[in-house]
Image: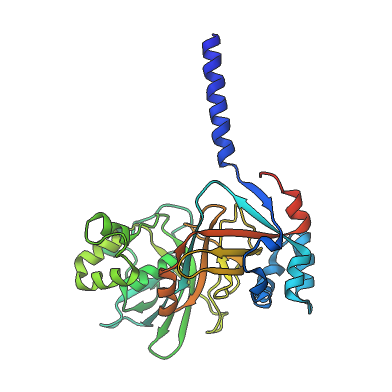
Amino acid sequence: MRRAAAIALGLWLGASAALAQTLPSRQILDFSDLKGWAADDHAAALNTFTNTCRDLDAPDWQALCALATKQVAPRPFFEMFFRPVLIMDGQSPLITGYFEPELLGSRTRTARFRYPVYRMPPELKEGTLWFSRAEIENQGILEGRGLELAWVEDTVGLFYMQVQGSGRIRLTDGSVMRLGFAGSNGHKYRSPGQELVRRGVYGIHQVSARVIRSWVARNPLLGRELLQSSPGYVFFRKLSDMDTGDGPKGAMNRSLTAGRSLAIDPEFVPLGAPVWLEKAGAKPLRRLFVAQDTGSAIKGAQRADVFVGSGDAAGQQAATLKDRGRLIVLLPIEMAFDGAGAF
């Protein structure tokens, strides 16, 4: 009995120690601890903050938003009413980039534009598991149902537009169709780049979106099968209330700002909060962002995705962004001190 009790106690202590390692911790910092803080463009960050702060419900945020929309000095505003909070969950930090793809397309199918962009089928309920990408494309499940929003020429570009969850299509009549996420088939995304590495086609450091596009173009049948190795499939909706110059809509249903909007894990970082980002790597980045988006792959207290803009140039920039660093959340003073311990 005593041995059993000792074993049980040991298991309990071990489980408690493991739990303690995974519980997030919070540390309040000073603004002087933020590398490069004084050199940033705080006015640009404040403009991005006011784009979404009116949608925050908590009284602390509402009061700060009302003040932010007046003529305030940007840097003193952040320093006077916020405190930097470093949140850690034991996971390694990772900062990546994402963008809004822009594809050429047509409202009707042609020999050039033959890949359909679909709206959500009415029978599919978000959160349920539906047909896989291969089944949708090979069995023609959506064909002839009038669900096509447009047709594009680039199957790899369409694939990555689904990965990003939004995009714009420059149509043959000169207009631009803006698209937002409408739903998915419930399957997870699998990286075609990692699949090429697994098959021994490329090494891990050789793979990029450009390399994948080139390989698919040279190997159309194998390329189709490669993209279908990722079973996830995303459906879109037209966004008619956006100007051409607006960024895509994020998780707060507001337009994102290139170089100032950040996708985060809302389990650790409140949507709408300012976030100081310090990225290492060949091109260090020290800047105040605003948490305005989320992503299925953005999980963890120190995980972030930087929105870099729209089009091919932004796509190339996003593809090269993968570095260590740290995220420091700026919280209203009372909120920062109320939650100074572990969650």
Image colouring: rainbow
Q: What is the quadrant of the N terminus in the image? A: top right
Q: Is residue 139 left or right of residue 311?
A: left
- Please indicate, yes or no, whether residue 87 appears anywhere in the rendered image: yes
Q: Residue at x 65, y 63 (%)?
A: 34
Question: In this rendering, would 39 be left or right of 296?
Answer: right
Quadrant location, the C terminus = top right
Q: Quadrant of residue 272?
A: bottom right
Q: Is residue 253 above or below residue 59?
A: below
Tell me the quarter of the picture where residue 220 sits: bottom left
Residue 289 position, x and y percent, is 61, 68
Q: Nearer the viewer, residue 200 or 326?
A: 326
Q: Position of residue 36 (x, y in %)?
A: 62, 69
Q: Position of residue 337 (x, y in %)?
A: 76, 51
Whether residue 251 can be seen here: no
The tally of labels here is 0
Which residue corresponds to the image point at 19% horizontal and 69% vertical from the top-left? Answer: 219
Toward the top, the furthest residue is: 1
> At x 73% / y 68%, what residue is drawn?
78
Residue placed most toward the observer, 74 or 163: 74
Q: Is residue 184 left or right of residue 154?
A: right
Q: Quadrant of residue 159?
A: bottom left
Q: Is residue 208 above or below residue 73?
A: above
- In the rendered image, residue 207, in percent from the top left (x then y), is placed at 31, 65
